[in-house]
Image: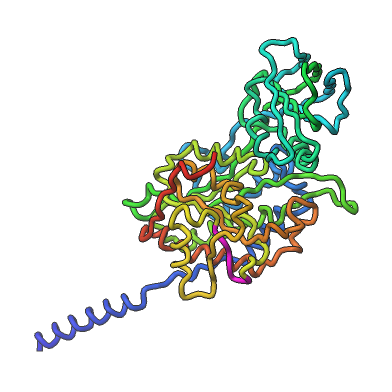
Amino acid sequence: MRNFFLLSLLFYCTHTAVGQKKTAPVSKATVSAATVERVVRTLAADDMQGRASGKPGGQKAAQFLAAEFQRIGLQPLPGLKGFEQSFPTYEVRTAAAFVTINGANLSPDKMLLVSGQPHLNWTEADEPAARILTVGADGNLLREARPLLEPHENTIVFVDPAQAAAFKRLAGYLQRGGLRPEKPAPFTTLFVLGATPPAPLKFRVAATTTIRTVELRNIVGLLPGKDAARASEQVVFSGHYDHIGMLPAVQGDSIANGADDDASGTSAVVALAEYFKQKNDNARSLVFVAFVAEEIGGFGARHFSRQLNPKQVVAMFNIEMIGKEAKFGPNSAFITGFDKSDFGKLLQEGAKGTTFRFEPDPYPEQNLFYRSDNATLARLGVPAHTISTDQIPDDKRYHSVDDEVESLNLVNMTNVISAIGRSAAGIISGQQTPTRIAPESVKQ
């Protein structure tokens, strides 16, 4: 009888253990559609005034996002007291410009001046002599101008009149920005829309420049890894919360709300932080970051990249403009730089068995891989890619006052975010690790 009792007890314990294994609880965490809509509507509201970097609306957006990370239960990065990762930039405003070329006065719409000299009185007689450059009708003005916006020598650039549209875009960029990541050196770049005059060139430039320190801030939160062997490895989820602020009024509306660009991607970062916090099973550490200053040069991503060891970042999911259906239809998104690592293939593998598709970037001519915050970490070897749905060649709302929440497909947007969360599972668990990007393959 005693042996029978012991055998019965053994059978019961074994049966109970097996039963418990089979009925182990499964996470029911889902991406919250309510969170997605609430965050995107808040960021794109008129009272955010277009979230321009260094402006009150941008600061208000940063405070809102920090409160969201606090609500979710993220931790600050080691070394930070809160979720704000602050850094200085320098606002440079040049006024009272007066320019003559070979005795002729230039009208304000024909010149752009970038200077680090508080009081400028510059002529051809000054030493060292000014460097003279030209941008022809077939040149790429925006690309050639980029290194000259932080001048380290005195330069005059004559821009062919055929570049009038690009010249206007450059003027708009300078008017929106005015912020630089480094304190400006005492040099000047003058852009002139017009043919290069005959030698000898005589000129006079007089202007006043004010330089003011402006503090900007990324919003960064951490979900520490649960696996001690993997916790030092980081997976980054990012979007930029800044936009371009105010524009000339169109039918009485002057606020560039930036609902798709990039309140949509930033809402994805918040929703994914909430989702992974609920799942509570991430082996690797997850870093959630809302970048500032993407629209004026990617300064936020640049500062962020200096605060971590890029070798510990195994992947970066940068989320940019996911508020509308992709050209591939609903339940799809594309990945920039698809050929630079196997990041995209791993996400495709993670989406198997679902109706969602991740596709390679269909707009290579747009250079989208280099136009968002992923490029900064990609230059350091991180498999850093942008996920988007925007049909950018045909997007008439891009950088306009019409980029409103009402133009977004919130249901499809939530599906995109959910697909990112599901497909990232292998990378987050440590079962998958994307190949590194060769830094030399990323344009500077």
Residue 330 falls within the magenta-colored stretch: yes
Q: Quadrant of the C terminus?
A: top right
Q: Position of residue 64 (x, y in %)?
A: 66, 49
Drawn side of residue 1 relative to residue 296, left or right: left
Identify the residue at horizontal 41%, vertical 49% (top origin).
436
Observer-nearest residue: 295 or 289?
295
**Which quarter of the figure is the N terminus placed in?**
bottom left
* Magenta stretch: includes residue 334: yes
In the image, residue 44 sits, relative to residue 410, either above or below, namely above
Per the rendered image, the range of residues in magenta is: 329-335
At 84% from the left edge and 48% from the top edge, which residue is drawn? 254
Residue 269: x percent and y percent?
A: 57, 55
Q: Position of residue 317 (x, y in %)?
A: 52, 54
Residue 210's quadrant in the figure?
A: top right
Residue 340 lies left or right of residue 70; in this view the side is: left
Relative horizontal placement of residue 347, taking residue 195 as reference (left or right): left
Residue 117 position, x and y percent, is: 72, 18
Residue 77 appears in view: yes
Q: Residue at x 80, y 49 (%)?
A: 255
| Colouring style | rainbow
* Quadrant hosting residue 115: top right
Q: Residue at x 68, y 40 (%)?
A: 140
Is residue 213 shown left or right of residue 353?
Answer: right
Farthest-out residue, front: 198
Residue lying furthest right = 251
Q: Is residue 223 visible?
A: no
Tally of numbered tags: 0
